[in-house]
Structure formats: structure tokens, C-alpha cells
Image (cartoon, rainbow, N blue to C red):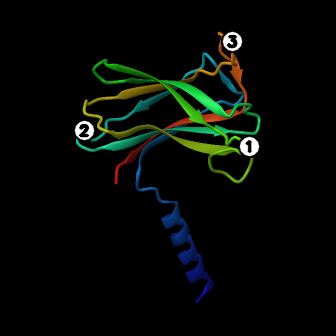
Amino acid sequence: MTKLNIFVLFTLLVLLISCDNKQVFDEYKSMPNGWHKDTLAHFSIPQLDTTKTYNVFLNVRNTNEYQYSNLYLITTLEFPKGKVLVDTLQYEMALPDGQWLGEGFTDVKENKLWYKEGVKFNEEGIYKVSIQHAMRKNGEVDGIQMLEGITDVGFRIENVQ
């Protein structure tokens, strides 16, 4: 086998492995200096097939600077015709021993968090999503102003297979 053939085979293998045939929408918003409590990550979802069913995820990337074992989020899903769904969600970010959940080889861990399963976007038009953190210290009423260690917040839609 020539070097050119080996290179072509290697390139094809990398392309096949990196293909993600489930992905319909996947976008991130960067939080370069932490996540302020008043900062919302906004996403506009383009027109989707109204006959298909989808699984929807929230993606969060965190570093070792993140000081908590869980994460509270408030999500708002606005339908094209004006209906609004608001959810308060809690996710575990670390095991009891402090080991981070999520994927990644460096100090950045990516967490793919379930949001909704088996969803049909049955209204034609643009859906809008916003995500805000709702973290508070125990016994305190006011939220944490700046949530350190969260680097990116994402929204992902996948085909159900």
C-alpha cells in the first residue's frame, strides 16, 4: 500500500467516526468569564420537520473552577405561535467523592444533559430557547452573582432513532 492510499484510508476513517447522523441542531454560547445570574443563553431553532420526533439536550462545559456538585437551570421554550414553557431543572455535575461527571480528557468536562425526550415540534416556525442558571448557596435567598467554572452552554436536538 502506498502512502497516498494509507492517507486516504485514514482520512475516510476519521470522517466516518466524526459523523453525527443524529444531530439536527447543536449550538453553544460561550461564558468566557463565568456565567452571570442575569445572563441568558439564547438559541433560535430553525424550522424542523413537524412529523418527526426528537430528543433535546442541554450541554454544559465546566472546568475545575466550578465549585458545586449540582447545577440548577431555568429554561424557557417559546413556541412560534406564542406558547411558553418554563422549566426549573437540576442536574448532578459530580459524584459524591468530587469526581466530575461528563466527558473530556482535560480539565474541561462536557455534560450532555437530558432536557426533553420524544418531542414533536408540531408548530411551523422558529422556536426560541433561553437558559439561565438558578444557583444559590444553602440558606441564602439571592442567587450566586457569577457562577465560576462554566465555560459554555449549549442546546442540542437529535433525531430519535
Question: Looking at this rendering, what residue extends furthest in the top direction?
Answer: 141
Mark 3 belongs to which amino acid?
Glu
Residue 97, which numbered label? 1
Q: Residue at x 29, y 29 (%)?
A: 125
Mark 1 belongs to which amino acid?
Asp
Q: Quadrant of the C terminus?
A: bottom left
Q: Residues within 10 Å of mark 1 (few under 14, many from 20)?
A: few
Q: Residue at x 66, y 18 (%)?
A: 136
Question: Looking at this rendering, what residue extends furthest in the left direction?
Answer: 51
Mark 2 belongs to which amino acid?
Thr
Toward the viewer: 158 or 115? 115
Q: Residue at x 23, y 42 (%)?
A: 51
* Left or right: 86 as drawn, with respect to 107: left
Residue 140, which numbered label? 3
Toward the viewer: 99 or 145? 99
129 lies above or below 58: above
* Left or right: 35 as drawn, with respect to 86: right
Instruction: Locate residue 115, reporting x and y percent.
Output: 45, 35
Q: Quadrant of the N terminus?
A: bottom right
User: Judging from the image, what secondary structure is the residue with disc 2 in?
Assistant: loop
Q: Residues within 10 Å of mark 2 (few under 14, many from 20)?
A: few
Q: Which residue is mark 2?
A: 50
Q: Estimate the spatial distance between the alpha carbons at disc 3 and disc 2, rounded to whole Å.
A: 43 Å
Task: State the image quarter where residue 91 is shown.
Answer: top right
Check whether the beta carbons of the residues at disc 3 and disc 1 lie within 8 A of each other: no
Q: Is tag 2's residue or tag 1's residue first in the polypeptide sequence?
A: 2
115 lies above or below 5: above
